[in-house]
């Protein structure tokens, strides 16, 4: 199942009327542990507003006077709501209860994937499709209005910010990246003019990265047909990737080494380029 | 009082752990109701419909850079309102400042708008020497 189809469990820590407040340390530890485990947690008190709830499962935890909070205190959405009195439960038992509920409600398990993907700043993006034609992993696509979108977030290679460097507008962010402007910090004039953003990966291999790789692939193929030496092919790829790595030092080695073979890269690049060209042609049609 | 949304950035070490711990601790002790999420980025990747509800109305969000938060929501069709959203950056601000700002009734919207994003003019670009 794709991550966009999974439902999630919301935990509500109820400390309003009809319940006893948790001790400060217990409340903090419960919240921390639930957040570390990937849950969304709402603390409900008599003071202040929280977001409404209309779908997905919710588990209400509290030290209830009668084992359950007064019915008029908790909004009853259509979604399934369960209650758990935690008066007698220690931290481990609370987490266990939440995990059990998650399991029973079929809600998503968190933490298997580090959420790393491009976030597009549409105030800057000009819809030029360079990112779409660059990315080999089908992360990008276009919406019904032909606008560029990050579509398959979990296809993105963890810790790799390469596409942010091919965007001519510095419009691609990775919020978990270490430095700006890729992390979402302001884009300065210096960023736009300086080397920092202008590492043009497609120029690194002496022009267009894809055609460079394709040429290598053709040469490699010729050699393969003569000697079929897989080791040589791997060396070739490593040499090529090493060059890329030297010039763009923040692209993790594992990412470079997990790139497809030159042949696959050539094929994927052609596909991505065709998708970008089709999107641009549609865009011209719409505008024209 | 605006709603409060706290992001724990659970799957990366980019928010200083001391800052997020202190903000969460003080929020827990404040007596104020609030929403906390493990990781807004993960919710965006899931296109979690809850983001729409978090984006509604007056809201103060303790997370990271306002430009990133704006488009984490906006990129999955849950636009934050430029007039009613304030983002507090736990990557750069101290916990004390964040808490003081979160717990006041007034709101100082600070999402970047299109004008902030315009390209620099030739004159603004640094010269080569
Ligand atoms: S490369 Fe940048 S400007 Fe071009 S479509 Fe992608 S995000 Fe937009
Ligand atoms: S929105 Fe910012 S603080 Fe929250 S998970 Fe993403 S990078 Fe971390």
Image (spheres, rainbow, N blue to C red):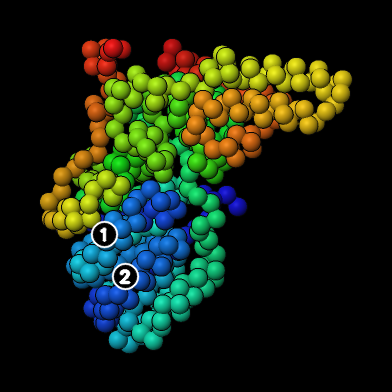
Locate residue A119 relative to residue A51 in the image: left or right: right
The total number of labels drawn is: 2
Tell me which residue sits at (34%, 40%) in the image.
Answer: B68
Report how far apart the C-alphas of labels 2 and 1 lie in the structure: 11 Å
Residue B77 picture location, percent across and down: 39, 41
Residue A207 picture location, percent across and down: 56, 13
Tell me which residue sits at (47%, 15%) in the image.
Answer: A284
Residue A230 picture location, percent across and down: 80, 31
Label 1 SS = helix
- Where does label 1 land, which residue? B23
Label 2 SS = helix
Q: Is residue A48 above or below residue B129?
A: below
The chain holding disc 1 is B
Residue A225 picture location, percent across and down: 85, 21
Q: Is residue A10 above or below residue B12?
A: below
The chain holding disc 2 is A
Tell me which residue sits at (23%, 64%) in the image.
Answer: B26
Q: Can residue A261 be seen by looking at this rendering?
A: yes
Question: For the residue with label 1, is its CB less than 8 Å from the closest atom of ligand 2?
Answer: no
Along the line of sight, which residue is nearer the eye, A119 or A114? A114
- Where does label 2 land, which residue? A28
Tell me which residue sits at (72%, 29%) in the image.
Answer: A235
Mark 1 nearby-residue class (10 Å; few <14, some 14–19, many ≥20): many
Q: Quadrant of residue B10?
A: bottom left
Any mark on residue A73, and which?
none
């Amino acid at each position: 199942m794709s991550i966009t189809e999974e439902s999630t469990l919301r935990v509500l820590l109820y400390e309003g009327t009809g319940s006893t407040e948790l001790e400060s340390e217990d409340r903090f530890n419960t919240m921390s542990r639930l957040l570390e485990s990937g849950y969304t947690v709402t603390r409900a008190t008599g003071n202040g507003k929280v977001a409404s709830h209309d779908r997905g499962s919710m588990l209400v935890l509290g030290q209830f006077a009668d084992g359950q909070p007064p019915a008029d205190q908790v909004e009853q959405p259509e979604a399934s709501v369960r209650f758990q009195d935690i008066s007698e439960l220690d931290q481990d038992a609370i987490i266990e209860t939440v995990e059990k509920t998650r399991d029973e409600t079929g809600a998503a398990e968190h933490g298997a994937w580090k959420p790393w993907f491009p976030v597009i700043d549409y105030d800057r993006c000009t819809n030029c499709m360079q990112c779409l034609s660059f990315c080999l992993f089908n992360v990008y696509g276009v919406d019904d209005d032909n606008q560029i979108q990050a579509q398959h977030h979990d296809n993105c290679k963890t810790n790799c910010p390469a596409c942010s460097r091919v965007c001519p507008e510095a419009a691609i962010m990775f919020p978990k990246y270490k430095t700006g402007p890729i992390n979402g910090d302001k884009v300065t004039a210096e960023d736009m003019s300086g080397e920092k953003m202008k590492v043009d990966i497609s120029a690194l291999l002496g022009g267009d990265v894809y055609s460079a790789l394709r040429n290598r692939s053709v040469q490699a193929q010729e050699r393969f047909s003569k000697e079929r030496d897989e080791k040589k092919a791997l060396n070739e790829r490593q040499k090529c990737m090493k060059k890329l790595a030297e010039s763009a030092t923040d692209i993790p080695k594992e990412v470079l080494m997990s790139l497809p073979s030159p042949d696959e890269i050539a094929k994927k690049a052609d596909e991505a380029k065709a998708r970008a060209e089709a999107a641009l042609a549609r865009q011209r049609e719409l505008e024209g | 009082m605006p709603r409060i949304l706290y992001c724990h950035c659970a799957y990366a070490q980019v928010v200083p752990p001391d800052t997020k711990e202190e903000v969460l601790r003080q929020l827990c002790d404040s007596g104020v109701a609030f929403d906390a999420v493990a990781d807004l980025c993960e919710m965006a990747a899931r296109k979690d419909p809850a983001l729409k509800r978090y984006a509604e109305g007056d809201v103060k969000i303790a997370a990271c850079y306002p430009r990133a938060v704006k488009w984490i929501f906006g990129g999955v069709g849950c636009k934050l309102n430029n007039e009613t959203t304030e983002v507090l950056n736990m990557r750069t601000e101290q916990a004390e400042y964040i808490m003081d700002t979160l717990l006041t009734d007034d709101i100082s919207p600070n999402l970047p708008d299109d004008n902030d994003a315009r390209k620099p003019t030739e004159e603004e670009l640094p010269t080569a020497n």
